[in-house]
Amino acid sequence: MAETRPQHQAQYRGWLYKWTNYLRGYQKRWFVLQNGLLSYYRNQAEMAHTCRGTINLANAFIHTEDSNTIVISNSGSSTYYLKATSEVERQKWVTALELAKAEAVKMQDTESDEEDQPQPDKNELQNTVKLLGSKLEDMTTCNDLIAKHGSALQRALSELESMEILTNSEHGSKAKVINERATMFRITSNAMINACTEYLDVAQSQTKRLQKLFDYEHEQRMKLEDMVEQLAKEQVSLEVQAKKSLHLQKNGKEKGSTGSDEDDFYDALDYRADEFEVALPHEIMTHRRMLSDTSEDSHIILDDRSSNGSDTEQDGQEARGSTVATVVKSTHKRNPSQESIKRTESIDSASSMTQKRFRRPLIPPRPSYSLNLWSIMKNCIGKELSKIPMPVNFNEPLSMLQRLSEDFEYSRCLDRAAESEDSAEQLAYLAAFTISSYSTTTNRSTKPFNPLLGETYECDRMDDYGWKSIAEQVSHHPPMASQHCEGRGWETWQEFTMTSKFRGAYLQIIPLGISHAKFTKSGNHYTWRKVTTTVHNIIVGKLWVDNHGEMDIINHKNGDKCHLKFSTYSYFSRDIPRKVTGVITTKEGDAKWVLTGTWDKKMEGAKILHVDESNKGKPVFETGPHFTLWEKKPLPPGAEKMYFFTRLALELNEPEEGVAPTDCRIRPDQRLMEDGKWDEANKYKVQLEDKQRAARKKRELEAEEAKKKGEDFPPYTPTWFVRKTDSATGNPIHMYNGQYWDCKQKQDWSRCPEIYI
């Protein structure tokens, strides 16, 4: 069975049963725990060539459900359900996993501390070279003296040997000269030896630092060479494609001519009112284009194609996540339905009944500070974004907690969804809401402030938007924020954590947490994951942002699902930029709605009225009129001077009385940055980060002391959120404890930690 190793190595291996899918249940797999990573294979023979999955224990949560079952969740990105053959074996695995996790966390913190240390300064290197040079000059001087006195000694000895007859007096004088020469030679030799010793000591003390600097510069040079080579290849490719495009234009080659789509390039087509593409789940259908334009109804042509089963849960999710495009033709006018207009008017009238508070319409303009971008970013290639010490010059005067609240700028979509009696229509409005949160990223290339552990943000907009939210940073390693928001007939909550990749030319942000929405009237509970955001042209060119990937919004009450596809932007693509397509299906796979639009402008939806299956097994869907689900509002005047903030973003950091002392509006470095005092803001930012780092090390020391005494050390506990098991997904999540607004009404902030200076 299990094969054990010394505990200090945190290694373990053996058989366990892993839950794969609902049809197969638990399957026997071979697991290997090593270097903080838990990997599994079908059998021992696969260890040499095929790994079926790996989870990093540094960011994982480990808990048990019963006497034999172990659940390992990695910040919501993946979850392993494992089953041991006995309770004793389960306890051995849990012990090994906890030890490995502790080792991985310690290793991660050590790497973080090393990353915080500055790289060797080149001025220090020059001083070292000068010191070695002076020591070398001393050695050269000693060497010249040794040669001089050595020659004199040799000359005296030669004269002594050549003299055939010596008197006693002459012999005594020559012996005295020889002794003096030998003494001088001995003195200079000792000086030479001492100089060589000093040089050797200095060289040995600086060798490690010089080697580290050399390796670092060599690595950076190799990365730059690879980057330049990649840029050169892309430039050559673009030139070839541009020549082909010009050649096609000169020859008058039309779009419908024969030829390979991969070799032909066209200008981006305008968005036509009678044609769009819809992303459909792989298990439902694939696609083909419709050639006839004579139909007066909307159609979707579908091809049946079954998906292959997956051995593992993770592989199965990837297989189910693949999407295809289906062309839809429509001659209906795209006017909003009267029912939708009535709902909008009722919501507007309800919100106008509440007295609105005056809020600021602008913030101080962003000052112009010169900054050597490459001098900072070159040290960050390949590192985790949350661990990179960055000046406020790259930031915007908002915290990540405030950016989460900014998602609710178009909360009207949730209000309309709450009033919808049809679950598919409700899902359509919810999908529009999830897409609307990306519209603020079009021109926003700056990063928000990383929240401190225990930092909070409340946003009470009941007077105008009809919702209020509370967010808190609940974890430092890994960085994790939790948020709860309640509005008119709905509530949402999420646990936001992410991973990032910086590769020089682009920065990629991959969210890992799960978002939830629940509607009071229908009782429907939905979950979804956010898609990937990529910032391009970090080094050269104008920064631009793209959101891409696939999103599944699942109704856990009746099984309805909305599958959305955020298409990756491509200069040579014939699709409209920033396109989003989707389809809403029932639990049985019947399509009910189609969605189309862009994440930066608007989304439209159409209800499927009829399904025609007479087309040789390929169903044809007839849709009703298309109407707008969501449309982006224009930016306020002068937004380009105010970080391209929307109207809501301008109001988020406005000072407010009566908030918690941990609220990010009180954070000094963020406030100084908004006021344009960036130098002072950078000083405060360093002080706050040092204070947080010292508090973390203090907790670690206390935990080690408690462990030595055999006592349990309680982990960090958030103020307004409590860690529970999510009933919908089965993953651990921080849930709102429902106490913040009561404490605010009483102005009782005694439980809040002191995190600011």
Image: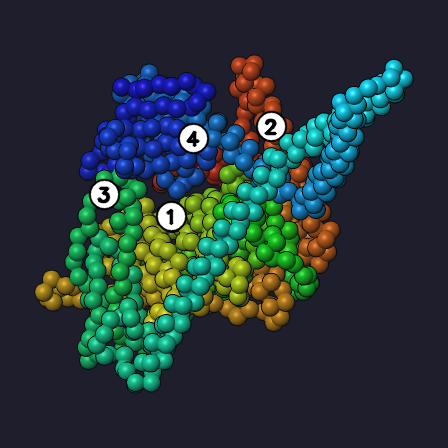
Q: How far is the residue under mark 3 from the one under mark 4?
A: 26 Å
N-terminal label among 1 and 3: 3
- Earlier-in-chain disc, 3 versus 4: 4
In this view, the residue in front, 90 or 517, is 90
Mark 1 touches mark 3? (CB < 8 Å)? no
Amino acid at pointer 4: Gly
Instruction: Tell me the kind of residue under disc 2.
Output: Arg
Q: Which mark is residue 36?
A: 4
Q: Residues within 10 Å of mark 4 (few under 14, many from 20)?
A: many
Q: Nearer the viewer, mark 1 or mark 2?
A: 2
Tell me which amino acid carries mark 1.
Answer: Thr
Would you place residue 126 above or below residue 361 in this image?
above
First in residue order: circle 2 vs circle 4: 4
How packed mark 3 is, by other alpha carbons closer than 10 Å (few <14, some 14-19, many 20 or more), is some
Q: For residue 65, what is the image quadrant?
A: top left
Q: Which residue is mark 3?
A: 310
Question: What scheme was used to colour the molecule?
Answer: rainbow
- Per the model, the C-alpha gap separating discs 2 and 3 is 43 Å
The residue where tag 2 is placed is 699
Q: Nearer the viewer, mark 3 or mark 4?
A: 4
Few, some or many residues within 10 Å of mark 1 (<14, 14–19, 20+): many
Question: SS class of the residue under badge 2?
Answer: helix
Q: Relative to residue 372, is residue 749 depicted above or below?
A: above
On the image, the x and y values in percent for residue 463 come to 57, 58
Residue positioned 44% across, 48% down in the render:
511
Pointer 1 residue: 527
Seen in the image, is 333 located left or right of residue 100? left
The span from disc 2 to disc 4 (Cα, nearest Å) is 22 Å
Is residue 629 or residue 704 the one in the foreground? 704
- The image quadrant where one finds the C terminus is top right
- Can residue 254 be seen at all in this image of the molecule? yes
Position of 143 with respect to 222 (left or right) is right
